[in-house]
Amino acid sequence: MGFFSKLFSSKPKVMPTHLTVDNFDDEVVNGELPYVVDFWGPGCPPCQQLEGIIISLATEYDGRVKFGEVNVHDAMAVAKRFDVMATPTVLFFKGGKMVERVVGFKGSLYHREIIEEDLLDA
C-alpha cells in the first residue's frame, strides 16, 4: 500500500482497549496476541500526541497485535506493577511477558520497528 493510500485509507480506525486492574491480566498477560500498552495521563501533551500514533498502529496491525491504554490516574496499581514512573510509557508484551519499554514520546517508525522486530515473527 502506498503512502497516499495509507494516508487516505477508508479502513475504520481500531481503538485501543481501555485496560484496568480488573481486565489487564486477561487481556495482556493471558491473551494470545502480542500486546502494546500505552500508559498515559490526563493533561500530558506528549501523551496526546502519542494517541494518534497508537490508533494508527492499532489499525495497521489489527488482527496481529493488540493495543491497549492505561490511564495511570485510574489504574495506579497497574502502573506500579510495571514500574511506570513517567508518561507516556509504552510497554510491549509477547507471550504475556514484557519484552520492551519506551519512556517518553517517540514517533511511529520507532514503535513500528519494535513491533516488527520484537513482537512479530519475521
Image: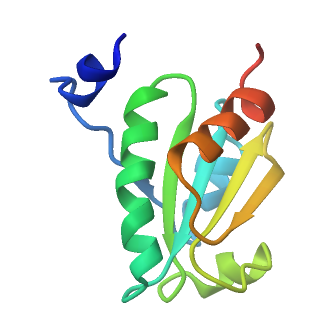
Q: Residue at x 74, y 46 (%)?
A: 93
Of residue 47 and residue 99, the one placed in the foreground of this image is 47
Camera-side residue of 19 and 84: 84
- Seen from this angle, which residue lies furthest front? 3
State which quarter of the image contains the N terminus.
top left
For this rendering, which residue is in front, 105 or 63? 105
- The relative height of residue 91 versus residue 10 in the rendered view (above or below) is below
The answer to whether one can see residue 16 in this image is: no
Q: Position of residue 10 (x, y in %)?
A: 15, 23
Residue at horizontal 52%, vertical 69%? 70
Report which quarter residue 22 is drawn in. Answer: bottom right
Apparent side of residue 83 relative to residue 3 in the rendered image (left or right):
right
Residue 109 on image: x %, y %: 57, 40
Residue pictured at 62% horizontal, 45% vertical: 111
Q: Which residue is drawn at 42% across and 50% down?
A: 53
**Where is residue 81 drawn, in percent x and y?**
78, 77
Q: Is residue 55 above or below residue 112?
A: below
8 or 18: nearer the viewer: 8
Quadrant of the frame with the C terminus: top right
Q: Does residue 34 lie above or below 88 as drawn?
A: above
**Which picture quadrant has residue 62?**
top left
Query: Does residue 23 appear in this view?
Result: yes
Left or right position of 66 against 49: right
**Which coloring applies here?**
rainbow
Residue 52 picture location, percent across and down: 35, 54
Q: Is residue 119 above or below residue 67?
A: above
Report which quarter residue 116 is drawn in. Answer: top right
